[in-house]
Amino acid sequence: MRGLQLSALFLLAAAFLVGLPSRSQDVEADHTSPPPPPPAEFQQHYGELSQKLTAFEAQIDASWDGSLGSGEFAGSLIAANGNKTVGLLGQTQWTRITQMLDAYEAMGVDLIKLDVNYPTLTPAFHTYLQANDPPLVPNYTFTAQNFIGTPNSFYNKLVTEIRSRGLGVWIEHGTLFQDYSPTPPGPYFADMRTSGVSATQSRYTQERSAEAAAIVSQLQPDYFSILEEPTTQNDNFGYFPGSTPLFDPNGWKGYVQAAAAAIDSAAPGSTTLIGAGIGTWDSTTYLVLFAPMPELDYFDIHVYPLRSLTADFLQRAIDWADYVRSVDPDKLMTIGETWAYKTTAQEVSDELDYNIIFGRDVYSFWEPIDSQLLDVMFKLMHYKDYTGVMPFWAGYYFAYLTYGDPELEGLSGIELLTIAGAEAQDNWATMTLTGTGERFRDLNLDADGDVYPNAMDNCPLWPNPTQALPNWNVPTGDSDCDGYPDATPEGLKAPESFIGTIATQHCSATPDIGDEDPPDAWPPDFNDNQLVNGADWLTFNSRFGSSASGGPPYEVRWDLNASGLINGADMLQLNQYFGKRCA
Ligand SMILES: [Ca+2]
Ligand SMILES: [Ca+2]
Ligand SMILES: [Ca+2]
Ligand SMILES: [Ca+2]
């Protein structure tokens, strides 16, 4: 199904997300206002995606017990996209990369994923480029050591930088895209193919597995994906006469074995987890071949289209995890790339115009879909115990464009991506997030340290590692779950912002009476002894009947319903807490 090779082109387009000047500096990213509704042109698309995500999320909710595994989201380091090759080497790009790492750290991300593309690390490729006068940067020195091999080589330096921040490293090894790299590999691959299928396979295996060995032995990533999307690798390499691909599925299995052996030999005793995998649109032949391989610590999937007319690609993320573990119970599962692909099921089943499809992602009206995909991926990760999940199109954490903006009229998908990418770059430098970026952050940050990230914690500012609630009613908007909302009244309850208590603290620090300076933490506990009883009730006596308009002894601290009066209605609120303790 040709349409489903699209994800390869997602990678390609990512090359355009970084390092290019903004062509339209006055196009504003829409990161403050709520996203607009989908325009008529995309209502069908939006409706199908929303319906599919909602149904799948409900399916997980019905089966998952809500407990969290060890899985974590990875930040997609698009600033260092491997297709940039020599474009990665300058100081300007280094600044962008470190700014993106700064942003990820602030968003609570602990694992960074990057792609490295064959033949960027292969000396013979650089020799070929030099001998064939390619359109490269002036004064460029043709050597693979620009990228790996010394402490100042780009990838050595990058991994050192990531490690120095205490972040994990996940590297996926792919193949450069023919037409979209500043060091086009097409002629090099064509030259290789002239030696015939068998000799080409041998040389490809030797060169690429040497790169894999260098990556693992020198960079020591936590995860190394030897291979993903094998059909994309065939496309990128180009075909022999008669449309013969570089490898068939068994040939790719042989490549994975050869690369794993080269890694073992170069990095004996390495603790890097080794994986390989396929897109959920790829043939299950690969699944059956790879699942039992002892060389692989993990099986990886890419998830882009949600469904076609005949296939449910999200469901495969459940089914394939179950299948792999039925074959090898010790095998880990990862999702190396995902994003919701903005198409109808009909379009996925038909041929697609990639340039048009890419351009769709840029609009802010998709924000609820992108955010919901993140929620779904979080739940799927913990439900099926995926150890790592990387949402791919990280630029949309930082900027979207506005649909209908006249400045964007008539632009191609790639042009739209370029503009959105430049906006994103500016915004990650200043830590400006879209709603999607805020959701990603809140799915990573765990403010109260109880393992549940803020977005999935029923009490984000009260440590409750079992998610058990206190034995009183918790209104909406009550982050510390002390019974009073943070900032917006709920029923008869004034918010803590009105009462003057601490909206981020559930309970007083000690059980001693009156030993803590105001403000109090728990509204019904007036003497900060972690207990609501008659002593708290008695504090009303001297203020009873006072009003805001009449002045003292009125104090907002006792006006628990914000009525402007301190009376029986406020005292009655203590009933539901009477005799109860906070902790
Ligand atoms: Ca938490
Ligand atoms: Ca909590
Ligand atoms: Ca409080
Ligand atoms: Ca008390």
Image (cartoon, rainbow, N blue to C red):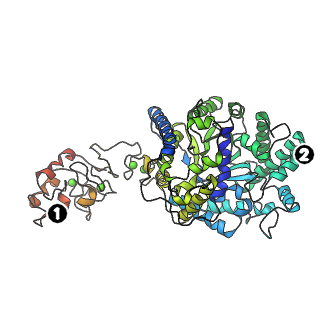
Task: Give the CA distance from mark 1 to mark 2.
Answer: 87 Å
Describe residue 135's horizontal placement relative to residue 62 as left or right.
right
Is 202 or 363 nearer to us in this picture? 363
The residue to which callout 1 is attached is 555
Q: Residue at x 51, y 66 (%)?
A: 430
| Pointer 1 or 2: first along the chain | 2
Which amino acid type is marked by label 2?
A: Thr
Mark 2 = which residue?
Answer: 194
Compared to residue 141, the image places residue 406 above or below, namely above
Location of residue 534 with respect to 331 vertically, above or below: below
Q: Residue 67, position in %: x, y?
A: 46, 39
Q: Of the residues shown, which amino acid type is indicated by label 1?
A: Glu
Q: Dividing the image into 4 quarters, which one contains the N terminus?
A: top right
Q: Is residue 30 above or below residue 253?
A: below
**Closer to the camera, 579 or 77?**
77
Viewer-nearest of discs 1 and 2: 2
In the rendered structure, the answer to whether residue 537 lies left or right of residue 343 reads left
